[in-house]
Image (tube, rainbow, N blue to C red):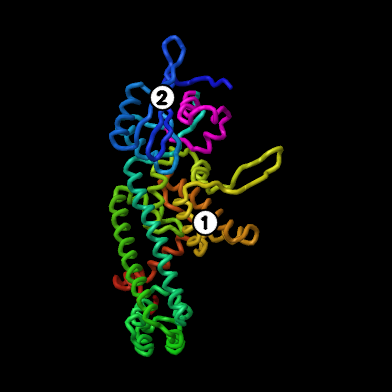
């Protein structure tokens, strides 16, 4: 297969954990080309040497696959010397016809890049790449916290304590105080007083739920679990403060995203560091959804659609959007109406996925136009009046425009 070259000097990089294989295809003045292979280590000095070699050969295009996280350090080294490498999707490379198995990966990347057959993936600016680490580590901590909370409930249940039956949040203020009382060995009659008067369950029902058989091993495990939960909660709070403080220049965009149903401040911040602030790099809401892989799959042959499964995309962003979809499905908004219409036909999981897709497309428009969200199912004027009418009436009475009897 003959591929027509568009670039004269191209470098392909096959990046692994401990080694980077480079292949440069360089066109001479007489139209012939030569191939130069080099190998570099993965340490900082090696990455610097790689960047210097790429500059020396005068590469017009530098191509590398997005394999795991190994591409990030070489990409940053090239960026430091003013070279914007093109990180391509490995799935895209494999679908391009050619003799990939007969040629080294680096040389095949160089051949495809030289012919202009590869499109680079979205790579956010260096500042947002650093903030991504904050956001993604926070998601990991959230998963660990959920696991520890579930484990605590299992230990209580194993000991015959059914506290989760009478409280809606087993880790709320009252439930946490009662759990600590049980760990300390206090009798249920004393522990039940920590419930206060805000729980819907009666004192008798709570007292019955607290009856169990906690032994020393149960108390030890529960004590360690509560300590881990509180430490992880404090750690997540520190991550939240750090992430929001770093995004102060984008506070206006965070305010815009918060106008969406189901989107709160920290969720907006985590979403923003994943997709960036410039929607022009995607070009359309459809391409953004395709990059996230939250849109339906497109596999058609001979006029028949054979599969509509979604691909594996940005799993951190997918998780965020699914959480936002869950929250939006419980609001009084047009998004709730969308979810209700899909639920009977497509089932719960597909309806949530479709709602996340719709939320992402709306977010694209908000960031593109820099306008707040306006919901078609909400009467904003009525909401405004409802919130402010008491204050307006007090002001009118104070200044004598109406009398209390008239109000």
Q: Earlier in the sequence, mark 1 or mark 2?
A: 2
Q: Residue shown at 43%/28% (left/top)?
A: 12
- The quarter of the picture where residue 199 lies is bottom left
Magenta stretch: includes residue 92: yes
Q: Which residue is mark 2?
A: 37
Main secondary structure of the magenta stretch: helix
Residue shown at 44% from the left, 9% from the top:
30
Tell me if residue 232 is in the magenta stretch.
no
Residue 19 in sight in this render: yes
Residue 217, placed above or below residue 97: below
Above or below residue 381? Residue 316 is above
Q: Is residue 347 left or right of residue 86?
A: right
> In the depicted view, which residue is nearer to us: 17 or 326?
17
Q: Which residue is mark 1?
A: 376
Percent position (x, y) of residue 357? 53, 51
- Pick out the residue farthest to the top: 30
Q: Is residue 255 visible?
A: no
Could you say which disc has been placed on residue 197 in the image?
A: none
Q: Which residues are magenta?
A: 86-114
């Amino acid at each position: 297969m003959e591929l027509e070259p568009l670039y004269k000097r191209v470098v392909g990089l096959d990046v692994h954990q401990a080694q980077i294989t480079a292949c440069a295809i360089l066109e001479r003045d007489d139209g012939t080309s030569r191939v130069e292979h080099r190998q570099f280590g993965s340490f900082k000095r090696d990455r610097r040497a790689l960047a210097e070699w790429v500059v020396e050969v005068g590469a017009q295009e530098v191509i590398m696959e997005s394999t795991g996280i190994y591409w990030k350090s070489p990409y940053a080294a090239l960026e430091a010397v003013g070279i914007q490498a093109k990180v391509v999707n490995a799935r895209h490379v494999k679908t391009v016809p050619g003799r990939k198995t007969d040629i080294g990966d680096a040389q095949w990347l160089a051949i495809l890049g030289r012919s202009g057959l590869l499109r680079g993936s979205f790579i956010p600016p260096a500042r947002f790449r650093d903030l991504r680490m904050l956001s993604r580590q926070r998601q990991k901590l959230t998963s660990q916290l959920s696991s520890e909370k579930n484990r605590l409930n299992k230990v209580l249940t194993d000991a015959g304590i059914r506290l989760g039956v009478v409280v809606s949040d087993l880790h709320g203020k009252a439930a946490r105080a009662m759990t600590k009382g049980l760990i300390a060995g206090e009798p249920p009659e004393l522990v039940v007083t920590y419930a206060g008067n805000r729980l819907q369950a009666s004192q008798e029902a709570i007292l019955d739920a607290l009856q169990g058989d906690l032994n020393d091993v149960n108390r030890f495990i529960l004590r360690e679990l509560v300590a881990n939960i509180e430490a992880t909660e404090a750690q997540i709070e520190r991550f939240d403060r750090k992430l929001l403080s770093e995004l102060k220049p984008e506070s206006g965009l965070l305010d815009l995203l918060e106008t969406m149903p189901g989107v709160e401040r920290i969720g907006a911040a985590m979403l923003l560091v994943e997709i960036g602030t410039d929607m022009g790099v995607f070009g359309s809401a459809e391409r953004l959804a395709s990059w996230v892989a939250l849109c339906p799959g497109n596999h058609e042959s001979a006029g028949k659609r054979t599969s509509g499964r979604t691909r594996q995309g940005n799993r951190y962003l997918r998780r965020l959007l699914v959480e936002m979809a869950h929250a939006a499905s419980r609001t009084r908004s047009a998004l709730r109406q969308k979810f209700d219409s899909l639920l009977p036909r497509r089932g719960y999981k597909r309806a949530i996925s479709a709602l996340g897709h719709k939320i992402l497309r709306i977010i694209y428009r908000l960031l593109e136009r820099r306008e707040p969200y306006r919901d078609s199912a909400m009467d904003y004027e009525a909401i405004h009046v409802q919130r402010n009418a008491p204050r307006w009436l007090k002001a009118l009475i104070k200044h004598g425009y109406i009398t209390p009897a008239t109000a």
